[in-house]
Amino acid sequence: MKITQISEHIWSLKIWIVIPIHVWVVVDKDDVTLVDAGLPFMAKGILQFIEKLKAGPLTRIVLTHGHGDHVGAIEKILSVIQVPIFAHRIEIPYIEGKVTYPRKKKPMITVAKQRTQALPENEGELQSMGGLTPYFTPGHSPGHVVYYHQQDQVLLVGDLFTAKKGILRKPMAIFTGDMEEAIRSSAIVKQLKPLRLEVCHGTSVLQPANQLDTYLNS
Ligand SMILES: [Zn+2]
Ligand SMILES: [Zn+2]
């Protein structure tokens, strides 16, 4: 697993299996958040890295969405440390196999039932946790969110985009429920203007707002 510190509070952990798969560890005072949980065999490396950081034990896992390549290490991590798991309330019935994900043939339980809690909301606004603010960005999946680290100006986007050589690309079509909606959700980049954007499957993107018009016309 390749580990890179991408900003003051955020580390990216990457494996390569046909495509790159990233998860992120975010440190906030004594609080350690894992954003997405990759594949099952990443659990050991994730936990070892958090131990080595000495910033405290894992506090929570937050999910951009519930596809299998974003939740894989959860079971193994929970067998070592009990932490809450959060996803958008709209995503949870898909995660628990009560509803079938768009473009899938049958429902799948990607995280055991009643493990995942809804991201807290106040008057319809998703609340910050561990230095990260979630924003609702549906399309790739019905309850997809991105997480913005305001202080570091880093946007962790899961599968809202992919990226190659620092260029924003559309999410992978075969896994994307509603591409038009996903493209509309990309407006979050113009709203937040992060210094840096990180995708699950691809490279880092610097100053992504500058690329958005080209992205929308591609
Ligand atoms: Zn996905
Ligand atoms: Zn993915």
Image: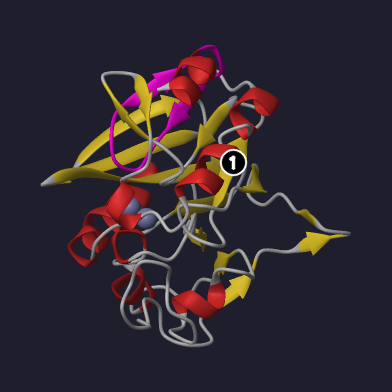
Quarter placement of the N terminus: top left
Q: Which residue, as the protein is rendered here, is positioned at the far left?
A: 18
Residue type at tag 1:
Ser
Q: Is residue 10 magenta?
A: no
Residue beneath the point at 70% across and 27% down? 191
Q: Horizontally, is 136 left or right of 73 in the view?
A: right
Q: Quadrant of ligand 1?
A: bottom left
Q: Secondary structure beneath disc 1?
A: helix
**Magenta stretch bounds:** 196-210
Q: Residue 207: horizontal and vertical position, in percent? A: 51, 14
Residue 50, compared with residue 164, is above or below; it is below
Residue beneath the point at 51% across and 26% down? 8
Residue beneath the point at 78% across and 61% down? 121
Q: Residue 44: horizontal and vertical position, in percent? A: 22, 61
Q: Decide which of 101, 51 is in the foreground and name it.
A: 101
Q: Decide which of 29, 44 is in the foreground and name it.
A: 44
Q: Residue 195: horizontal and vertical position, in percent? A: 54, 18
Q: Is residue 203 magenta?
A: yes
Residue beneath the point at 41% across and 55% down? 36
- Circle 1 residues within 10 Å: few <14, some 14–19, many ≥20: many
Mark 1 vs ligand 1: CB below 8 Å: no
Residue 32, compared with residue 90, is above or below; it is above
The residue where tag 1 is placed is: 185
